[in-house]
Image: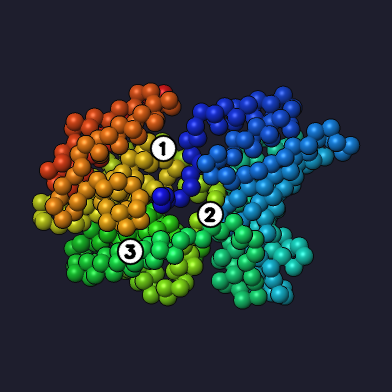
Amino acid sequence: MTTFGRFSDAFKPKPKLDAWNTSERLFLEKDYMGSYEAFLNYLRDDDEGNLNFRRSVGTPDGDSIDFEFQQGSKSIHGKIKGGKVETEADIAEYDKLSVAFMRRLMEMNYSLFYTRFALKDNKICMRFDSAVPASPPRKLYFAWKELATRADKQDDLLADDFSMLHTIGNANIQPLPSAEKETKYNFYRSWLENTLKRVSELNEEAFFGGISYLLLNLAYKIDYLIAPEGTLMNEIEKMSWEYFAKDNKPFQEKNKKMKEALQKLLDIPKDKVLEDLYKVKSTFGIAGPAPHQAVVDLFNNNIKNVKWYIDNNYNDIAIAIYEYLATYCFFSYGLPRPDAKLFDLMMNILNQDYYTALNSGNKLYDAASGKFDEVLIKKRIAEIVASGLELYPELKFNTENLKFDSLLSFLRTFIAELQILNYNN
């Protein structure tokens, strides 16, 4: 079955939290190797299969740990030995040195906190090394996250900008079945075409708010449901960053730039789009963990905008705002797992044709008749809540408050219940 969205390491289950606490305690006790072994167990996602390590004890050179973990298309490998932690990831090979890309690497080094770009054997790599006593688990987490996420992103960006560079170390890419890629591409084009057409029908001045919701939701929807990698992912991230940049530009201008960027995505040749559709394993989530209150704040800042569009018969924009609440959260936050699962249920209902085409999830809603599978939806919600009770014993979702007479009624009541979930533990 197809899975959606990006990997998140936020809100790990209790055994992983126990491993983290053990790691910090052992480090304070100066049992460094024991601390790092617990830390690596914390990072290892049992479902993802993202990390391997081997601890050698009692060798002539002392204890050591060799490790390797995955982040997107990159393998990051290293060793803890002789009082040092050394970590490295290959980025790209070069045919010859260039002043332009050397300057780029130097500029990027200034933006890094823990790691650095380096040259080695006609290769660009990223490195982190530090003395063991200066590398507690918390520092190591942020250092390795910086190295892994930057390495995974920069290989494509550098290779696109400099012709003498060639990406390497992409063996971790897992190709998707051809039928799945074809389905994803067809929906990708359809969503882009339909949204851009709808936006063109709206007055840019009077409807700049609605246009923003339509365009942003489209970008985040592609990110969650299609989950492209490489250049496509970078374009979506850039689009979002430019829209929310505090640059005092009018929203009409920001909308225009977003439309141009989305049209650019539509114009990318099919073979290039398909190249960016593949699966990867990851160790670190891009979005940082966010508490449920961040979701509630987003709701409070946006739900009030729905009423006007409903009252004036722009139901498609009202639905887009509700969907935006889910897609923005997926893009921007590492969500508590019950929130993520409930939002996916909502996306299943809003995009039932897509989920059905990919043979993913359940048939929860029939758009033609406007009928819901009320029993199945309530059952799925109960399962999601039950799965979160170990960490959040006060979690409760009252499905009796859901309304199934229309899609908008369902979305309104579903969001209202999600808004008051109790995550106290």
> Where does residue 341 sit, x and y in percent of width and height?
36, 40
Residue 401 in view of the camera: yes
Residue 111 in view of the camera: no
The residue lying toward the viewer, choosing from 69 and 336, is 69
Locate residue 24 relative to residue 395 in the image: left or right: right
- First along the sequence among labels 3 and 2: 3
- First along the sequence among labels 2 and 1: 2
Q: Residues within 10 Å of mark 2 (few under 14, many from 20)?
A: many
Circles 3 and 2 in contact, beta carbons < 8 Å: no
Circles 2 and 1 in contact, beta carbons < 8 Å: no
Q: Residues within 10 Å of mark 3 (few under 14, many from 20)?
A: some
Depth-wise, is mark 2 or mark 1 nearer the camera? Answer: 2
Query: Marks 2 and 1, Cα distance to the nearest angstrom?
Result: 20 Å
Q: Which residue is located at x 58 percent, y 52 percent? A: 71
| Quadrant where the image shows the C terminus | top left
Query: Marks 1 and 3, Cα distance to the nearest angstrom?
Result: 27 Å
Q: What residue type is disc 1 on?
A: Arg
- First along the sequence among labels 1 and 3: 3
Q: Residues within 10 Å of mark 1 (few under 14, many from 20)?
A: some
- Say which residue label 2 marks: 280
Q: Which mark is residue 247?
A: none
Q: Which residue is located at x 12 percent, y 43 percent? A: 405
- Say which residue label 3 marks: 187
Q: Which mark is residue 337?
A: 1
Work out whether 41 lies above or below 322. Answer: above
> Where does residue 364 sit, x and y in percent of width and height?
24, 46
Q: Which residue is located at x 22 percent, y 66 percent? A: 198
